[in-house]
Amino acid sequence: MGISNIFDIASSGVTAQRLAIEVTGENIANVNTAGYSRQQVVMANGPVTSSNGFPLGSGVQIQTVRRSYDGMLQQQIVTGNSSYQQNLAKQSALEQIQPSFNELASDGLGSAVDKFFGAWQDLSTNPQGTAERQSLLSATQNLTDTFHQINSSLTSVASSADSDLTGITSDVTTSAKNLAQVNLQILASNAVGGSPNELLDQRDLLMQQIAEKVGITSTLQSDGTATVTLAGGQQLVNGTKYATLYTSPNAAVPPVNNILLTGLGNPPPANVPGSDTNVSATVGGAGNSLGQLGGTLQVRDSIVPGYLSKVNEMASKLVSAVNTQQASGYGIDGPPATTGNNFFAPAGVTAATIALDPALTAAKIAAGLPTASDPAPTSSGNNGNALKIADIQNSTLAFSTGSANFDGFYNSLVSGVGSDTQSAQNATAQGAAFLKQLGSLKASNSGVSLDEELTNLTKYQQAFQGSAKVLTTATQMIDIILGMVS
Amino acid sequence: MRITPGMTADNAVYNLQQGRAGLDALQEQISSGTNVTKPSDDPLTTRQLLTLQNEIDAGKQASSNITKGTLLLNVANTALGGMADIMTQVKSAAATLLSGSSDPTAIASTTSNLTQLKAQLIDLGNTQIGNQFVFAGFKNSKPFDAAGNFTGTNDSLGVEIAPGSQVGSTISGGSLLRGGTPPVAVGTGATAGGSPVDILGSIDALITAISSSNSSGVSDGIKNMATAADQITAAQTDVAGRLTRLTNAQTMITNNQNTLESAYGDKQNVDYAKAGVELSQQTTAFNASLSATAKITQLSLLDYLK
């Protein structure tokens, strides 16, 4: 073994330490990069030779630059994000809906219903009073306005959810395109034998971003590329090919967005709404429980329609109960006083359409109910029917949720909105805590610690200095030997 | 477990957020003065609060109805008081002629006096408050014409004092002054002084008897007048009874409102002492967490590496 071997060993040390410092530098540079996994240099001693009769290694080799990574944890983070984003979408919609039902802070539908029946009570104490009749008409106007306002605020939450879908699908497509690009780079990197650690980080981050938006199943291939499948089983990304997820209005009036998926390709085939796969029913996962898209679909297709149907039910019951009683009483118009008039327009049985009957005048409000001593048409001071209509407020009606009076039904609805909002908030808070925990675990495993890197830097720097010193020593040894010769 | 500066930063942000959220919730409670500001704060309490609020509102409405009913009954009561006074005068005017005086001056003055008193009874029977006639039943016009014919109805305007419970706030003029609708026959001989009595018809009969110096007619008339006075008194008692019922109902509603409002307040009003203590605890915790965050995030090995 000659002096030249010392050179070899020292230079392998210098090279290895320099690479280790490079990796440390890379780690420090990426301390705040999202999705970055710290890299570690794995060193091993060189092949052992025994040319001098003693087995001795031939310097140091870099075996690999390893990425600190836990696939299982990553999968949990992906799933956790998917359901967290779903709850977040629901929570933000419910927080928009709640103020319409916040009877505690402001007068809403419940108070409007009370005022409406209160006006009937007032009318019953002075059935011929013009002021009482006029104030009943105003209270009714207030009631129908409140119904319309609730209807429009619920509808606008649904329609803004519908338009959100376009942005979400376009984000998904962008991420899918980027993932296909990363897959391509991974293949290229494999071809030249490199270990594409940063590309793998990007791949994982992109899959996580897609999962936040939409429920997916992902498979990692042996070549390092990712295949992404939507909840309905359609492929979104396969190798270097990806599909476009997009929205297209359907034929309903007013139109709502369908979610469509093109075939795979790079670039994928152009959008053809007529023949592309309609994934609206499956893309959110079972019960639209996955991803921001699932949450948004829930808001549009079940949460808002659910509340709206209850408000509509209330409007319909109110219109039919009041109209039936109004029709059996007599107004103070005429003479003769008329009967059989409508109070509400009979066609308006939803929160959107409830309205006073166009033919109703203050005089046609039927306060009078014939009695033995006051037969039809009744006198203008007769309050029998006004009392009966005022009593509708306390009468138990058969609602879809069971028997209740108007106040009871509406109060249940308010408390239902409250508990839905509360449970979405709780689910989101729990999801956030869970993700934070997972994030800590991931950071503990993959995160860059500056303290650690700085220590490593010092360590590698000193090792570099050491190897360099060996080189200097070997040089001096050569010089000495050459000096002996001369 | 490896701890990285990123983890410390994430933890700090998360915990500061939690602290801020807690402070924010307390601040909202204290500044609004209410425990539950949104249904999602406490859905169950929201349901209870709304039910309490509905009952309080129903009490207010019933209370307002009672006020109107009381007004109508008080007006009727005043009119009945006037009627009772008139009946006393009718009785004393007729009594002076009980012996069957034939003095034309006395007869003339008494009949003229009685005619005036009858007209006053009719006026009182037409008593109105606003556009409501308290003795007209459901009719919205003067219930008695000048001759004393009743054109109202025999109904009483029911006022709701509690859900499903009504008190009549008007008196039927037909039953009060005419003994019924149509008027009952004027009592003579054996039927004189029978109940119910057609008061206005009996006064007419009395005037006729006095004018014709019919002493048995005058005596029948005086018996009728005695019953008539009782009939007015009975109506006064009826009205007084209804007023008592309204007053009792009002008292009950007031008590109920107090109970309901204190229950509402118990649930909804912030206990400032408790909230204040919590706020101070929360502030201390938040300060500590801010200070700890500031100190920990400054620590770096870089400060010691040369």
Image (cartoon, coloured by chain):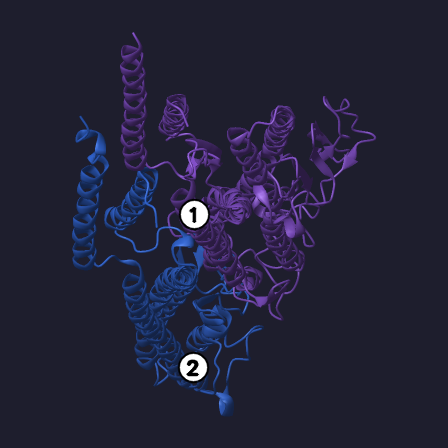
Chain colours: A purple, B blue
Residue where numbered disc 2 is placed: B221
Q: Is residue A92 placed above or below A388 in the rendered structure?
A: above
Q: Name the image quarter holding residue B242.
A: bottom left
Q: Residues within 10 Å of mark 2 (few under 14, many from 20)?
A: many
Can the viewer see residue A368?
yes
**Where is residue A421 drawn, in percent x and y?**
47, 51
The amino acid sitting under disc 1 is Ala
- As drawn, A359 above or below A306: above
Residue farthest to the right, as pictured:
A275
Task: Specify few, some or many for label 1: CA neighbours under 10 Å numbering under 14, 14-19, or 20 or more.
Answer: some
Quickly name the residue at label 1.
A432
Q: Chain of mark 1?
A: A
Q: Quadrant of residue B183?
A: bottom right
Can you say which quadrant of the picture contains the N terminus of chain A?
A: top left
Q: The C terminus of chain A is located in which quarter?
A: top left
Q: Badge 2 sits on which subunit?
A: B
The label on residue B255 is none
Instruction: Say which amino acid is labelled 2.
Output: Gly
Local SS, label 2: helix
Residue drawn 78% across the image and 36% down it: A277
